[in-house]
Amino acid sequence: MFKDISFGQYYPVNSPVHRLDARVKLLITLMFVVGIFFIKSYFGFMLTAVVLVLIILLARLPIMSVLKSVKAVLFIVAFTALINLFLGGENGSEVLWAWKSLVITKASDHTTIKMVLRLVLLISGASLLSLTTTPVALADGIESILSPLRHIRVPVRDIAMIMSIALRFIPTLFEETNKIISAQKSRGASFDTGGPFARAKALLPVLIPLFVNSFRRADELAFAMDSRCYNATDKRVKMKVAKIGIGDVVALFVMCAFFTVIMLDRYYWCGLVDTLIFGGLL
Amino acid sequence: MQAIKITSLTYIYSKKTPSEKVALDNVNLAINEGEFVAVVGHTGSGKSTLVQHLNGLIKTQSGSVEIFGNPTTDKKKLKQLRFDVGMVFQYPEYQLFEDTVAKDVAFGPKNMKLPKEEIDNRVHRAMELVGLPYSDFAERSPFELSGGEKRRAAIAGVIAMEPKILVLDEPFAGLDPVGVEEITALIMKLKREVCPTVIMVTHDMDSASALADRVVALYDGKIVADGHPKEVFGNRALIEEIGLDVPFVARVVDRLEGEGICLDKGILTIDELVSALDKYKKLTGGESHV
Amino acid sequence: MSYIVLKGVNFTYSLGEGRSLKALKNLSFSVEKGSFVALVGMNGSGKSTLSKLLNGLFLPTNKQGQVIVDGINTKEVEDGTVKDGDGNEVTAFDVRRKVGIVFQNPDNQTVATIVEDDVAFGPENIGLPREEIVERVTSALESVGMQDYKDRPVSKLSGGQKQRVAIAGVLAMRPDVIVFDESTAMLDPLGRREIMSIAKELNNQGITVIMVTHNMDEAALADRIIVLSKGEVALDGTPKEVFSQDVTRFGLTLPPATETANRLGAVGFDFDGAMINEVELVEGICKQLR
């Protein structure tokens, strides 16, 4: 039921991408995500896909590991695609298919294709971050970026700790969920029959033990953390210090270049490149 | 009558990915009604994968599993299969969820869609069997029980389905000595009174040799030994090769042999050891005082 | 020299609604520096409560009760009035640095996803210089033989390996005492042996080990066994002394070697005191058969 979830699953290899500073990676991911929303032309999508594949190769990740996270949300992608297909049409666009009030136009066709591309690229890009960055580094990165908020009394360090513990426990809780599901199935429970209400109710025998056990775990973890002097001093030192290296500068530079091209394509070239490449195909 | 028939069962996790792992490799096993089988093997040898095939939790990839003649792939009989094969997982107390013990025990029978009266009867009976008298425990919250009581409540939840085959995964894990004794007695009682066929997955070779009348040893997904505990543990070379512990009594027998006192390698219980040594002493006793 | 001293310690859990549970009653004993002490007793005897008192996670609930660790009273450090020789304030964290605890569940005591990050957690918390943290993490991982796993996610390790990481996390604090609070209970036999041999090795290096366990074979490895029953010390002595008594009164079992020797005693064998392991047992038997 809950297999193949790659979120929070760090893929441990030593690559230039893995070695990048988490803060830089967060920033790059942010630019990448924002960039994707500004893409308008097929050329933009192509460029993004090429950049993405290059990063994956550079990170020495198997393509499958990235596609797996796309697979996990395939349903959402398909659903939004359908909605777009039927509702995304513009008045006056060439009608490709029509049945009663459902109409597919050439424009909605393109919007849908672009929407799917956008989502797939977005999810792949975001999963790259979690595949190449340890949750701890990620939490540290976020802590570092948020650290100015400390001055307005935001408990940044505790928030970072909560995040890193949450990430740490994701695999444990998934494993436990699977175990409880198996146990309740063995007592004749079924999770895939009946209406939505019945199904939600059928989940209780899984959710209640999961909650009870999580509280027990939290309790024990709190003792373990206390034993190891959590909160002993305000001057907590980090073993791993993030240093901005030459690689980080290069990566940022490349990402800025990418971002600029996307912006130029949208606001200045205005689909010119598409016409150049694809000609009358569109 | 044959309770379980497994024919050339092979199971591969994460098939066709780099992390592909063969969990079961052409396993053939037939278990008759009334047998007590201990399934042993080190962590990752395929024990859990094997037993989860028995009630269809894991779908067969290749080969077949039949329970009382019915293939586990028969979708129409899946529910019946779940009720026929009672599965007690490791640390079953972590699956309790209702607000009273009685309701939790009733979960299985309710899923069986039994009439209310029958459900009540079964809950009563199961609770009495595991030693949690209905009058004292029915209305208590399962979360307030002691560790051993919780485990027995969870077992009652499986027993209430009146399974024909009982599968237990590490039933003694984490218990104190008293708890181990209680659960041991309970398992033997359940075998006598409810489900004559018992399959127990365990790391503990002492309890495997003491309780079971047949030991099936797995190694790398293959059955490498199958027979009476005396036979299986008698083959010390194999036991060591597949990374299992030699039961305590057998270790003593080996050490004695190292000292020149040769006893039967099939000796597995303290009683057998004591009577063998008694005999040995009477045979040689005279000489030692000469 | 006594490193930990308990004087008249009570511990009472308040359960709300005016109800309470007395977990420990008037407990007094001391632990010598460098010793290996096993703490045994059935579930609910107060063992786990006691281990949390040893590093100040819990404080005695009675006024007279005291737990003194290396001269520091765990109650007094709470209010910040205790100073060391140099006039620095001694805090509860100083006690926790001296006495580390390895808990039972391998999954519930690692904070970080990656092995070395987790081991660094303690040293980071006490604000050591970075170079020293790195050095401590490296040597702690080497002590438990996990240096090759430093970049791995904890969740992918076996139970025994997870516990070794937990031990490394405690070692990185350079403690004088390590309490193993049923740290082997959830492991397979291989994992148990790994943890026991690490505990022995650390003890040989001078670390005081307090081993809370249900396993009598593990307890027999200690220099001293303290048997808790209903929150009180029921027996206290060497394994030989303790196992020559009837420990079943306290919900325990004898180690199989002791049990065997006792049964042999009934058929005319005669041993010199309790046999606490198979080597002694075999020696004892041989003496009488040659």
Image (cartoon, coloured by chain):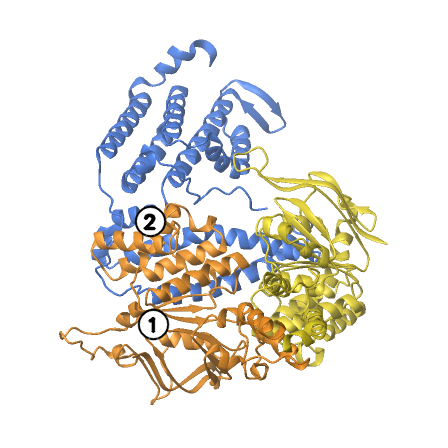
Chain colours: A blue, B yellow, C orange
Residue farthest to the front, as pictured: B290
Q: Position of residue A256 (x, y in %)?
A: 26, 29
Q: Position of residue A42 (x, y in %)?
A: 41, 20
Element under label 2? Answer: helix
Q: Position of residue B77 (x, y in %)?
A: 79, 49
Residue A198 visible: yes
Q: Which residue is mark 1?
A: C34
Q: Residue at x 38, y 46 (%)?
A: C148
Locate the N terminus of chain C by quadrant.
bottom left
Task: Indicate left or right for C21 with C261 as reference.
Answer: left
The residue carrying pointer 1 sits among few (fewer than 14), some (14 to 19) or many (20 or more) residues within 10 Å by Cα, namely some
Task: Tell which subunit mark 2 falls on.
Answer: A
Locate the C terminus of chain C by quadrant.
bottom right
Residue in front for this viewpoint, B21 or C108: B21
Q: Which residue is mark 2?
A: A139
Residue type at tag 1: Gly
Give the distance between the C-alpha atoms of the residues marked 1 and 2, in whole angstroms: 40 Å
Q: Residue at x 36, y 35 (%)?
A: A33
Element under label 1? Answer: loop
Residue type at tag 2: Ala
Quarter of the image for residue B174 reads bottom right
Q: Residue at x 49, y 35 (%)?
A: A70
